[in-house]
């Protein structure tokens, strides 16, 4: 009995040192189950590995959600998709699958204030995290000065054709460039010697228009 207890303790400590927390938590109960049901060693090990994978996925999801800055309350559980058109619902279902990330496609949702653009965007972010993708939620309303706007422009330029960006806006897409230029002028313009605020080759409209199946999405007013 003493040897069995020591082996149990040593195995648990070994699994913990190897950072196999899921196995450390489950191996004893699963061993009893395997003995009672006459399961093979292979079946036992397979079930143990599945427990480890499930725990790692849960912890990764929690970490990604915490780091994302997403509003916790804005998920599809708290949004009535039924009030949207079937076409728009189809777009959202496709976005939830995250295929656009594989092709570094950018997404723009435009519409009047209060129609649910930010809620849908955040909800898609939650779904992508559940699928294992990292997401960063950044309300542009928090950008107050020229330096912060410059960070945004640099961020967009660096991600162009490499990573996806989703933007929600009340502006007509064709006026967004003028809006950013106005913001730049308000904060003093681009001074000689400053780094470029925007990649001159970046054109989100061209990126969206040349990608079949992903036009700018309009939410109903």
Image (cartoon, helix red, strand yellow):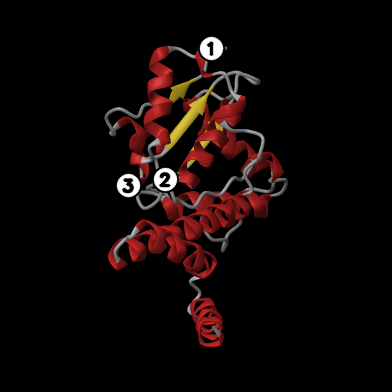
Instruction: Residue 50: tell me if it is visible.
Output: yes
* Disc 2/disc 3 C-alpha distance (Å): 9 Å
Classify 137 as above or below 45.
above
Q: Name the residue that disc number 2 marks.
A: 164
CB under 8 Å between callouts 2 and 3?
no
Look at the numbered disc 1 and give the secondary structure of its residue. helix
Against 216, residue 140 (above or below) is below
Residue to which mark 1 is pinned? 83
Camera-side mark, 1 or 2: 1
N-term-proximal mark, 2 vs 3? 3
* Residue 154 locus on image (x, y percent): 52, 54
Q: Nearer the viewer, mark 2 or mark 3?
A: 3
Residue 30 image point, x, y percent: 45, 62
Task: Report the disc number at residue 102.
Answer: 3
Mark 1 vs mark 2, CA separation in Å? 27 Å
Label pair 1/2, CB-CB below 8 angstroms: no
Q: Nearer the viewer, residue 68 or 61?
A: 61
Badge 1 density bin: few <14, some 14–19, many ≥20, Cα 10 Å: few
- Estimate how packed mark 2 is, as few (under 14), some (14 to 19) or many (20 or more) residues with alpha carbons within 10 Å: some
Where the N terminus falls, by quadrant? bottom right
Residue 198 placed where, x, y %? Answer: 49, 50
């Amino acid at each position: 009995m003493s040897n069995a207890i020591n082996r149990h303790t040593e195995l648990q400590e070994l699994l913990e040192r190897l950072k196999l927390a899921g196995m450390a938590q489950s191996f004893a109960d699963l061993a009893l189950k395997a003995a009672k049901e006459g399961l093979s060693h292979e079946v036992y090990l397979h079930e143990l590995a599945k427990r480890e994978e499930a725990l790692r996925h849960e912890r990764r999801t929690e970490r990604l959600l915490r780091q994302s800055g997403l509003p916790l309350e804005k998920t599809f559980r708290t949004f009535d998709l039924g009030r949207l058109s079937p076409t728009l619902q189809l777009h959202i279902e496709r976005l939830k699958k995250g295929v656009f990330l594989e092709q570094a496609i950018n997404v723009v949702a435009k519409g009047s204030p209060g129609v649910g653009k930010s809620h849908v965007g955040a909800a898609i972010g939650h779904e992508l995290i559940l699928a294992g993708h990292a997401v960063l939620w950044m309300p542009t309303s928090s950008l107050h000065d020229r330096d912060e706007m410059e960070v945004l422009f640099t961020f967009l330029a660096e991600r162009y054709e490499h990573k996806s960006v989703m933007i929600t806006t009340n502006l007509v897409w064709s006026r967004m460039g003028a809006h950013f230029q106005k913001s730049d002028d308000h904060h003093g313009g681009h001074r000689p010697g400053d780094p470029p605020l925007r990649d001159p080759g970046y054109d989100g409209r061209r990126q969206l228009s040349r990608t079949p199946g992903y036009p700018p999405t309009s939410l109903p007013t």
